[in-house]
Image (spheres, coloured by chain):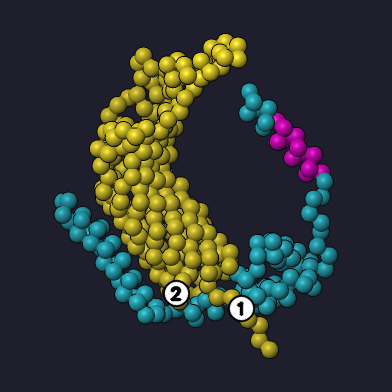
């Protein structure tokens, strides 16, 4: 009797880092924002989950996010904590083949549902008034209360990527990916508390992207 | 200040725990039943708990007997199975891969030529 052995991982998880080079002139042209560095401009954190639905094909969800956080230095303001994220949410279809038992080449095409979010944690007294009125009912002294709100923008795009994966173990692999992203972003339609406002300019229309991932096959 | 206190607390707790053997040592690792499970299900068929135990058994067995043949056979059988199943592209997958290749070529090469 020969033992049965599972083939390719049906479900796999990925964690990784990406590198890209957007021009975020909406922040770089203004010295109130945290200084641009590699970690808050070029680095993307990545996670994803894939399901093998056909012999040589997987479908899944993969998210690349760029983060920025720091204190704003606006004159007359309360020096609020500024945080910004740009998330490229992808729903890839990936085909692959193995050129050696431990080496795989893969090809993915994906639509992108991008979202950027900017939030400010302010310490303006005006924002805290409502809380202070409420608290004074119970005999509290006025407090300096932080308030947080966020503005958001969504957009669509697409991406194509080529990858090479090396399996360290049959369930664990390392992967390098290279590709491009095309985003239809506009700074005109940001949303804040139901209002449509103009946001920062991002030059993210055509971008090459490189990523390194660790893949774990769970089933 | 609270952050520093938390770090000190974590360091103190980990220092105490390091003196306690939380994970018991595996007796007779080379005849552990998890090896039979791995042979039957394959490594990818095991759950995370079984995989962790298998990796510990593998490490301890190789350390005690210096022979990794059993483990090598289990894994190479899986690699071979994967290789046979995905050595060639099936049905529409080759066309799809071709399209991805063309899109990347178009983006990098023709895009670069257009910019210059």
In this rendering, is residue A187 above or below B105?
Answer: above
Q: Residue B89: image x %, image y %? A: 39, 78
Q: Nearer the viewer, mark 1 or mark 2?
A: 2
Residue B60 in view in this figure: yes
Determine which residue is flagged by label 1.
A5
Q: Quadrant of residue B44?
A: bottom right
B14 is within the stretch colored magenta? yes
Magenta residues, start to end: B8-19
Q: Position of residue A205 (x, y in %)?
A: 26, 48
Colour in which chain A is drawn = yellow
Q: Secondary structure at mark 1?
A: loop
Are marks 1 and 2 in one subunit?
A: yes
In the rendering, at what x and y percent does residue B16 appear?
Answer: 80, 39
Report the residue at 46% width, 64% height from top: A165
Which of the numbered marks, if any, corresponds to residue A115? Answer: none
Q: Residues within 10 Å of mark 1 (few under 14, many from 20)?
A: many
Which label was assigned to residue A54?
2
Q: Residue furthest front?
A: A137
**Residue projecting furthest to the bottom:** A1
Which quadrant: the N terminus of chain A? Answer: bottom right
Chain on which label 1 sits: A
The quadrant holding residue B96 is: bottom left
Image: A27 above or below A110:
above
**Figure quadrant of residue B33:** bottom right
Foreground residue, A150 or A202? Answer: A150
* Residue B38 on the magenta segment: no
């Amino acid at each position: 009797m020969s033992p049965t052995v599972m083939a390719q991982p049906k479900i796999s998880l990925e964690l990784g880092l990406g590198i890209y080079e957007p021009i975020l002139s909406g922040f770089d042209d203004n010295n109130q924002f945290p200084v641009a560095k590699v970690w808050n401009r070029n680095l993307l954190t990545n996670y994803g989950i894939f399901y093998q639905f056909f012999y040589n094909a997987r479908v899944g969800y993969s998210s690349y996010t760029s983060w920025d956080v720091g204190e704003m230095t606006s004159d007359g303001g309360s020096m609020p904590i500024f945080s910004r994220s740009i998330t490229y949410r992808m729903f890839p279809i990936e085909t692959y083949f193995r050129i050696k038992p431990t080496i795989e080449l893969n090809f993915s095409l994906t639509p992108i549902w991008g979202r950027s979010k900017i939030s400010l944690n302010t310490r303006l007294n005006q924002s805290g008034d409502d809380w202070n009125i409420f608290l004074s009912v119970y005999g509290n002294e006025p407090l300096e209360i932080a308030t947080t709100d966020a503005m958001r923008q969504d957009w669509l795009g697409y991406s194509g990527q080529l990858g090479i994966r090396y399996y360290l173990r049959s369930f664990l692999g390392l992967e390098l990916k290279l590709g491009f992203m095309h985003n239809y972003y506009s700074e005109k339609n940001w949303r804040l508390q139901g209002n449509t406002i103009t946001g920062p300019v991002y030059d993210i229309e055509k971008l090459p992207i490189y990523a390194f991932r660790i893949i774990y096959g769970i089933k | 200040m609270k952050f520093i206190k938390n770090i000190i607390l974590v360091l103190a707790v980990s220092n105490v725990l390091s003196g306690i053997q939380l994970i018991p040592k595996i007796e007779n690792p080379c005849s552990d039943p998890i090896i039979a499970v791995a042979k039957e299900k394959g490594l990818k068929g095991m759950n995370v708990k079984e995989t962790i135990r298998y990796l510990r058994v593998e490490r301890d067995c190789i350390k005690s007997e210096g022979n990794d043949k059993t483990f090598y056979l289990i894994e190479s059988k899986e690699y071979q199975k994967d290789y046979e199943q995905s050595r060639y592209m099936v049905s529409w997958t080759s066309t799809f891969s071709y399209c991805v290749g063309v899109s990347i070529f178009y983006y990098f090469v023709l895009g670069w030529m257009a910019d210059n």
